[in-house]
Image: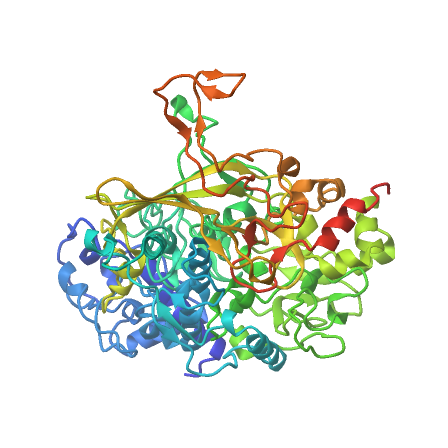
Amino acid sequence: MRMKIKSYLKIVMIATVLLATTSSFGAMHKKGKSTMKSVKGGDSCVKCHNGIESIRDDDSDMMTQIKAMGQGVGDTGGCTICHGGNPKNGTVEGAHKGALNHPGGLSAFVRDPGSIWIADKTCGLCHADTVANTKKSLMATEAGKIQGNLHSWGSEPTKKVQYANYDIEDKDGKTPAWGTKTYKEYMVALMDKYPDQFPTKLKQLPLPPEGPKDLKQKKGESKEAFDKRIGYQASITYQRSDCQRCHIGVRGRKGRGDWRGMGCSACHIPYATEGIYEGGDPTIDKKEHGHLLVHTMQSTRDQKVKTPSGAEFSGIHPETCNSCHNRGKRIGVSYVGLMEQPYGSPLNEGGKSQSKSHGKKYKHIKEDLHFEAGMTCQDCHTSIDMHGDGTLFGTTLGQVEIECQDCHGTNKKFPWELRIGVGEKFGIDLPEGARGLAKELPEWMKQGMVYDPEGGYLLSTRGNPLGNVVKKKGGSEKVIVHLASGKDLLVPLLKQKAQDDDWVSKDAKASMDKIQKHMDNMECYACHSDWAPQCYGCHIKVDYTPGKTATDWIASGSTNFKNGETSESVLGTKGKKLFGKPSETRSYLRWEDPILGINGENLVTPIMPGCQVTYTVVGPDGTSMILNKQAQVPDGPGGSLVAGTDMSPVQPHTTGRHARTCESCHSNPKTLGYGIQDGLFMTGQGKDKYMDLQDLRTKKFIPKSKTVQMKAIPGMNYDWSQVITRDGKQLQSVGTHWPNSRPLDKDQRDKMEKAPLDR
């Protein structure tokens, strides 16, 4: 039987879906055993799971191949190709043991074939390169998140990326495994210029303290060294327990909004917010939380996910992405228009508080216009953005290859007329001439839906075809984007708008067509981001008093078994525990008028509180070992020390058609980095605050018995929203990854305030 590469590769994706959707198998069920009776006859799992949805349409190439492979081992249904097991055995226990001469070496029944720990034996049968690349990608290593957070704590003062969720090395050299010749040359040049952001080897994040003995001052250890060590250990405890639950090596925090599979299944298996199964498998509890929606994979436009109620969709739904992308920069929930809040209003039926999703309550602000148009995350983000290209990346800026101009062009040029590298200013040598269009897709891009190229596929700024974005044939200057959700959209082209004088407003024409520096030196979303979630002041307490524990997500994922499970992945399990329990709170929340700064590409961008860490460590005896401390990091001009309370460059994913007003930048001191109303507020945070009777003439407090209401944050005499002072003193770090990231330069700040606003 002749197998096309495209079809064969789909088998792995099916396997991934199968494993994520079968969390109900009796052998792995949290209740411990199934009530099913022994059965006879047939060689397929469906003799018990009668009514379960096919992981892929039965007439698809992928399902045809899975069944063909299954027949080769005596399983006409093909279930064992992804799950292992022995359907010939008539008992629940026996059917969920071992594997039937699995062609990829699977030796045990697996609930979730997508688990990254065994994916090479399941999904990797057909998608070996995808699985290998994904293990090096940021969704697996989380190297950038780890480095950024440790930098904010002062634990790793440099911007060199060193740690990951597990030890891993890029053994095949700098050149990416995926990518066109242009792309590979671009990436090698980028790696050569920024070696700290493109590591060749990563070590697993160090272990946290094991017990009280590790928190004692050592003989001969100075107080300064002791405090530094305790802060470092607290940062590791926090990182392992609070930050690492989203990597695809674990199933993560199992709860409302957080239900998902592992590895490949984390993206390719649909889970609803409540985690309730709505399919036809009679063995799955329809009331128990923690199951996939239906036993069908979500992937591309030609693969429909259908429920018994008649609903259907295609593509990987943004809510799947949101099961992880709801912390940090919060781009997932921001994209669908939501921002977390501490309140439970408006109230639900019976006066009950709003239910939490992802452990948070939300308010509705405004959706990204792309989401309003029906676009999923995958409609913009490429396979390399998601799976990686075989390189070890240190940051999302390194892995994500797309720019706004790739589809929309500029006011002077259509997308195909642009040079490679437009939209990024990394300062590397770039090829001359127009980037053009691609007529064909490379083999690694044919794993999903392949669209008619018509006049040609548009290219990313780094030189790869965008397989779903095509120039209309026939010589017209029109671009169509094919959405995974099933729609086709006409892409607005800026050059066409300029030629037709078709601007939304006079402001738009002035800012985009008359002031070329805006187009040359700013990210498009510096103006077009309607809002950004701003969680000011991240106050972290790490409590080491007796009995305080939390899940160690790195240890939990590293404790994995031959069936692909980890110590925390099965319903009802909590994973490996560590000593100590972190908790978080904040100072205040905002969403309007994002501050501007410079990102790693040397372009003006929105910046938002990344992790404005102020940490407190409570020792085993209940006393404060460290209280309200902010790390100092060498991120200021010339390596000068500033607070590690990071203001992070961000693409907020809150794009609006009507850009922010000229006044919101040119006459707003907050936007320039000077703080809300020019840093007028919160200037006394470095002193203890009391609330009591006071002699208003002398400002002395009258009672002898008084208690501090607000404890001081040593050294902080400015508002959390202030990045730099009027006289140019940088107060906080801006970006924890790239050397170019910083506040707006003085000449930029000065020119912005002097710019006339009459238009």
Left or right position of 208 against 499: left
Q: Is residue 295 above or below residue 429?
A: above
User: What is the tally of numbered marks visible in this picture?
Assistant: 0
Q: Position of residue 321 (x, y in %)?
A: 47, 54
Q: Give residue 145's quadrant in the image.
A: bottom left
Q: Position of residue 1 (x, y in %)?
A: 41, 83
Q: Can residue 195 be seen in this view?
A: yes
437 or 419, nearer to the observer: 419
- Residue at horizontal 47 percent and vertical 75 percent from the top: 390
181 or 630, nearer to the observer: 630
Left or right position of 389 against 374: left
- Residue at horizontal 41 percent and vertical 54 percent from the top: 270
Q: Where is residue 632 in the image (x, y as percent from the top left)?
A: 48, 53
517 or 638, nearer to the observer: 638
Q: In this view, does 397 lie above or below 64?
A: above
Q: Give residue 140's quadrant in the image.
A: bottom left
Q: Give residue 466's quadrant in the image.
A: bottom right
Quarter holding the C terminus?
A: top right
Left or right position of 224 against 404: left
Q: Is residue 620 above or below residue 488?
A: above
Q: Can residue 369 be seen in this view?
A: no
